[in-house]
Amino acid sequence: MFSQEFMRNALLAGTFIALACGVSGWFVVLRGQVFAGDALSHVAFPGALAAAAAGVDERVGLFGATIAVGAGIGLLRQRSFAGGRGTAGGAPAGDTAIGAVFTFVLGLGVFFLTLFSTSSGGGSGIQTAHTLFGSIFGLGSSEARLAAVIGLGAVLLTLAIARPLLFASVSPDVAGARGVPTRLLGIAFIALLGVVAAEATQAVGALLLLGLLAAPAAAAHRLVSNPYAGIALGGLLAVVAMWGGLMLSYAVPGLPPSTATVTIAVGMYYASTIVV
Amino acid sequence: MGTDPHLTWNLARDVSEVLEYHFMVNALLAGSVVAVMAGLLGWLMVLRRETFAGHTLSMMAFPGAAGAALIGVAATWGYFVFCVAGGLVIGRFSGGRGRSWSEQSAVIGSVQALALGLGFLFVSLYGGVLGDLDNLLFGTFIGISNGQVLVLVGVAVVAVTALAALGRPLLFASIDADVASARGVPVRALGIVFLVLLGLAVAATSQITGVLLVFALLLMPAASAQAITARPWMSLALTVAIGLVVVWLGLGIAYFSAYPAGFFVTSISFAIYVGVQVTVWARSRARMGIQTSEQPPAEGVIA
């Protein structure tokens, strides 16, 4: 299995993207921002299409769109929290704004899709768009190395701001009074999430991002209460799910790697609800 | 006429040209039915802060369409089955005591990831390319048959009747779950029934706007109306009115344009949403600046 080059590339990229998802996912779950992460993975697609329609490198549009929308969501969140926390179930009111914004960006995506497919002369735009969004088994070695570097960078950045971010997430008012820049941290974190979303979406697909962001971290939150142990466990569970998924789909023909990985990750969460 | 539609300065003529085509009449009928249904259920979705659940239900269309292709039935059936099943699963696993909001959103995300994974598995087992992927994602209004309009009307009648029957306890449970629960309202069961109804509305809406753009009719009109007025019946009526205007304008412009209807429907809806938010914000700013009003900022009780 390890003699196959595509498998080595998949394991390399997969390990670090899973680690980034698991570690940042712990904060995403803590802050109730799974929907924001999901929305970021959706705007990656129109961003890349807009860049393609404008004739610039897709990555510019990809990272530009996710980081810009991420920062926008961060700002909106500040406003909606300023007026007090939302109502039913404590859900933040910002979710409505997130839904409206990403739907509009997707609407623009349709526009660019039409523009793109007519300007490039034939050939469905959506087919072209699909080539922008790889599958984990289709990574080249340089792409895999880039994904690993970005994943590792995201993990290190998250750990670097972990302490103040934790304070700001658990007790925003007290943290603010103690001089922690809670606003800036919130925006920085979600912009960082935008980078993870952009890289994961184009390298391994948006599905893996969502599955690895939510489920392993939610299991970690259930299993341990110490924050640093939780962050480590979230990262570990995500990597285990990724390795298990890759190996399972290598062994079982017809089983897509993303399906296997997500199923294992969600299985972990389900098991954690039974244990605790 | 017929070859290349273009706008003239005579609005009445343009409208009558649009209405001469059977497919446009069907599209407008289907769009109107969907706008009413999506408006009513979306209004409650916004009130209950279940936007993420609504989005996850819209994603159910992918495994639905893929599963339908796999067993060889029409994609529409797959949509409805998976959207309703998705409502049941989310309702069953995300609610309940002992789960914080942040964990609920993780559960909803996990359900969505699992459903999409199932969709990829179906595509892989199917072995072929899913037809009409563009239409699935971004919608089409060309070629809606009389039968499809009838199905949409049927689904809408079922959903709206159920909503009317459950309206009062559902509203109570949505505004203050704890008090409602103490008064003996079955909050949890109502929540599950609501998500199933929302699944029906999402599946119906995605037939017009496409899976990715359902919020143009489900979320934005309701969010706009709730920001304008806090009175429930007023904002409910306003939601439906905004939805109808958005659909009619969007389909009308799309008829005369080279770009897809989804783009126009979404853009018009978003423009209304942003306009309302900015107006409300500016007015509350102005009021706070003058400091004569004793009222709190113009954020309604339910907005």
Image (cartoon, rainbow, N blue to C red):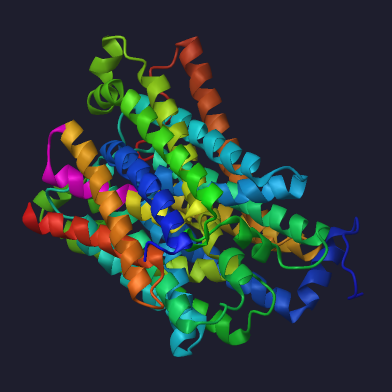
Instruction: List x then y, in percent, for residue B141.
Output: 66, 71
Our reading of the magenta stretch's main secondary structure is helix
Where is residue A275? Give x, y as percent: 7, 55
Between A219 and B97, the one nearer to me in the picture: A219
Q: Which residues are magenta?
A: A213-226
Q: How many marks?
A: 0
The answer to whether one can see residue A14 in this image is yes
Q: Residue at x 52, y 61 (%)?
A: A138
Residue at (84%, 59%) from the top-left corner? B11
Splitting the image into 4 quarters, where does residue B82 fall?
A: bottom left
Task: Assess whether residue B188 is covered by the magenta stretch.
Answer: no
Direction from residue B197 to residue A273 in the image, left or right: left
| Left or right side of B16 for B120 | left
Residue at figure coordinates x 56%, y 34% from the top left: A68
Inspect this view and state whether residue B257 appears: no
In front: A13, or B247?
Answer: A13
